[in-house]
Image (spheres, helix red, strand yellow):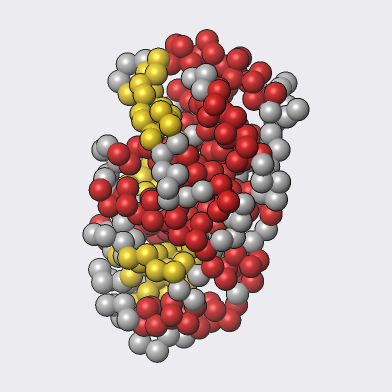
Amino acid sequence: MKTVILHIEFDAIIESLEGLETDQILLIVENSIKQEYPQQIERINNLNSKEVITLFVDGGEQVKEMGTFSQVLDYFITSGIHRESHLVVIGGGATSDMAGFVAATLLRGIKWSVIPTTLLSMVDASIGGKVGLNSTQGKNLIGAFHQPEYVWIDHNFLNTLPEVEWQSGWGEIVKYSFLIPPSKINFHQLQDIKSKQLIASCVQYKGRIVSGDALEEGQRRVLNLGHTFGHAYEKLFSISHGVAVSYGIASIFILLEQKEMLQLWQDIYLGNRCAVAPLPWTRDQFDTEKVFATIQGDKKRVAGAAIKLVTLSSVGNPLVKEISLEWISKEMERVRDELEQLRR
């Protein structure tokens, strides 16, 4: 199924919800959205043609724990749902990851849709059908591919976005600035991360990649640029996903000694002082053995002692390389030290 992605305002979202081919909507909403947009949530709860069963949850990575997932399943199972129910989630990327996995597993799979409310979820997390949970051993190790039927992007939700969420979204936009061909995106666009055009460019790129490789068997792997190191940083330093991914991109360029790419990363990422997050650890906090151990557990590891990492031959031309874990281990101190230079 191909996801329909619409850039629309809330009145049009209400019309779309009324038009869903179901009599029952299962609604998952982040508590922060309930507090900031109570009238919008009330309008959904009072749709004319639907029974709406609503559950409020806390956002953030903790929502992707097995305990929360189990509680959400139990809540809906005991609420009189059926196979034609349609799940709708309103929130950030972590919440949509969990909710999508609920939809993928509930009654062996029901339809679902997303109303993303953060920059990161608009440009990346809500698109593509990767849904799941975190394990104690690593991020996103439990999950499935389950495409949403709709993604409704209302840019007005960005009006109340806290600084940390702008920083996280900026990290993912930087990823796309390396993946998208220069003819489709330019440095001037990158200076305004609130630009609807910039958000649309990221959405269009990911949508095109996913439509050609829904199960990540080929080209879709390039969307993991920065994620192997990034997931390790996110887990070990408790930083936002987008910030971790951006420093993960820098780490790949350092590891593979791509100096021109690293300089471009500095120009783009560090150059946007409105959204950049400073290096989120000190040299002493960066335990190379712990970082490497976490990288070893990444789901992109292949049979044998190697892992697939995404890099670029040039901007807009990503490629996947199989890299020896033993070699990465030997280079970790150099990666740490060169990252530290970015602080200066």
Percent coordinates x, y for residue 332 in the rendering: 56, 16
Percent coordinates x, y for residue 79 in the rendering: 38, 72
Asked where in the image residue 285 lies, by quadrant, the reply is top right
Residue at image point 49% right, 44% down: 177
Compared to residue 300, the image places residue 156 above or below, namely below
Compared to residue 129, the image places residue 319 above or below, namely above
Compared to residue 85, the image places residue 119 above or below, namely above
Q: How many marks?
A: 0
Can residue 113 be seen at all in this image of the molecule? no
Q: Nearer the viewer, residue 202 or 19?
A: 202
Residue furthest out toward the bottom: 48
Residue at image point 38% right, 35% down: 317
Can residue 253 be seen at all in this image of the molecule? yes
Residue furthest out toward the front: 183
Q: In the picture, which quadrant includes the N terminus? A: bottom left
Percent coordinates x, y for residue 240 in the rendering: 60, 44
Residue furthest out toward the right: 344
Residue at image point 53% right, 77% down: 41
Percent coordinates x, y for residue 296 in the rendering: 45, 23
Asked where in the image residue 14 lies, by quadrant, the reply is bottom left
Compared to residue 219, the image places residue 164 above or below, namely below
327 sits left or right of 20 in the view:
right
293 sits left or right of 273 in the view:
left
Q: Nearer the viewer, residue 165 or 44?
A: 165
Residue at image point 51% right, 48% down: 186
Asked where in the image residue 59 lies, by quadrant, the reply is bottom right
Q: In the picture, which quadrant includes the C terminus? A: top right
